[in-house]
Image (spheres, rainbow, N blue to C red):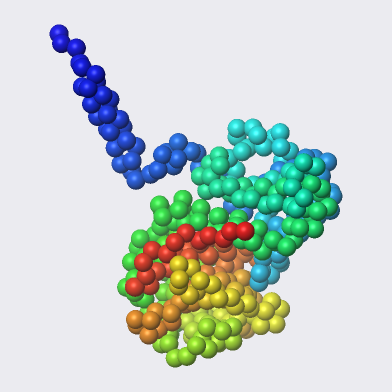
Amino acid sequence: MKSYSNKKMKQLFFAIALVAMTVLTGCKKSLSEIVMPESSGAPYELYVVMPEELRGTALDDSIRMIFEYPMECTPNGDAYFRLRYLTPENFRSSVIKIVTNVFTVDIDAQNAAAPVVKTERDAYALHQVIVNAHAKTTDTLAAYLPQLQESLRSIYVRNELNRRIETVLDKDHNRTQGERLLKLQNVTMLIPDYFKYPGVGAADSAFFWCTDNGMSKESHLVVYSIPYTDQNIFTLEGAVAVRDSVMRANIEGGIDGSYMTTNKKVVLPEYKALSVGGKYVGELRGMWRMENGLMAGPFICHIRLDEVNRRVVFAEGFCYAPNDSKRVLLRNLEASLWTLRLPTDNKLPEIEVTL
């Protein structure tokens, strides 16, 4: 029996390696996606990693002020995050260190004179974000962190939205409702699989509405469009006026004469201009309520200009949960809104916020 030459052996090993790589990449995943576990932990749960002796200090107060800040336009001021604390020793355990959202504190006299905050992504697990804060003293870090508070909150929120889109909506969305949306409004959006129940607009047959039809709490998505007339639509007053007009005509309450409107007294609506992938997105947040009725809750609306068809598209999520936190319900709706695509859109990039 003839033995292989060195050249033939190399060719054989190359062929085996090529087959292995084909198998590994056949599902279009990177090596890190195959080897790394998915991050764990409840949505919008943030693990603060710092020594036990720092609990109850000014630094701890600063961290709580930033991450337990009330969400915009929620009736009971739901906090941005639920905080959990770990010591550095506990965090290093193999199970705990794959949690999704981590904020670490490093106080050391050898650190740089000015506080430093750095972000790591996918350090131990996919869709994981770790923000590391370094300082010489607790007082300097406690005074510095509030200057970054909006960016710090946004880093974790955007990470959670992307995690929801990539691990839930991309894999398990309601195709029936998606096809119905495309037919009615000629746009696409990833709708949660459990939104199985279509709503029917009272006045507009093209008004898209679907819901999970929950018992103790419920979530809804609506999409509608109006002709583009002027830029005033992309202002707080203009957006609210359009919303109130369309919702009044299409969403009626259970009591005769009741209809949906925007609360303009208890919790004032807010409008923000965003840019994602070079595309303008108007974001309207506020509280909805039933005029001549009893129901109310928070909503978030994305407003896009469809230049080709000379129209403005409104995509909104609203929820009702009188006895529960609205944080996760509202954020899950927001994740779907970020997947809205107009006919001329290419795929928009991942939502990113950096310090």
Quadrant of the rendered image containing residue 89: top right
Above or below, 184 relative to 171: below
Residue 163 showing in the rendered view: yes
| Quarter the C terminus occupies | bottom right
Furthest toward the bottom, the residue is 229
Q: Residue 16 at x, y = what percent?
A: 27, 28
Near-viewer residue (318 or 69) = 69
Near-viewer residue (172 or 16) = 16
Q: Residue 128 at x, y = what percent?
A: 56, 47
Q: Residue placed at 52% from the left, 76% from the top?
A: 282
Quadrant of the rendered image containing residue 273: bottom right
Furthest toward the left, the residue is 1
Horizontal placement of 143 versus 348: left or right? Answer: right
Above or below, 96 relative to 339: above
Horizontal placement of 349 versus 259: left or right? Answer: left
Q: Residue placed at 79% from the left, 46% from the top?
A: 136
Q: How many marks?
A: 0
Above or below, 16 relative to 228: above
Horizontal placement of 316 versus 171: left or right? Answer: right
Furthest toward the top, the residue is 1
Q: Residue 291 at x, y = what percent?
A: 61, 83
Near-viewer residue (133 or 311) = 133
Q: Residue 64 at x, y = what percent?
A: 76, 55
| Quarter the N terminus occupies | top left
Q: Residue placed at 74% from the left, 57% from the top?
A: 145
Residue 191 showing in the rendered view: no
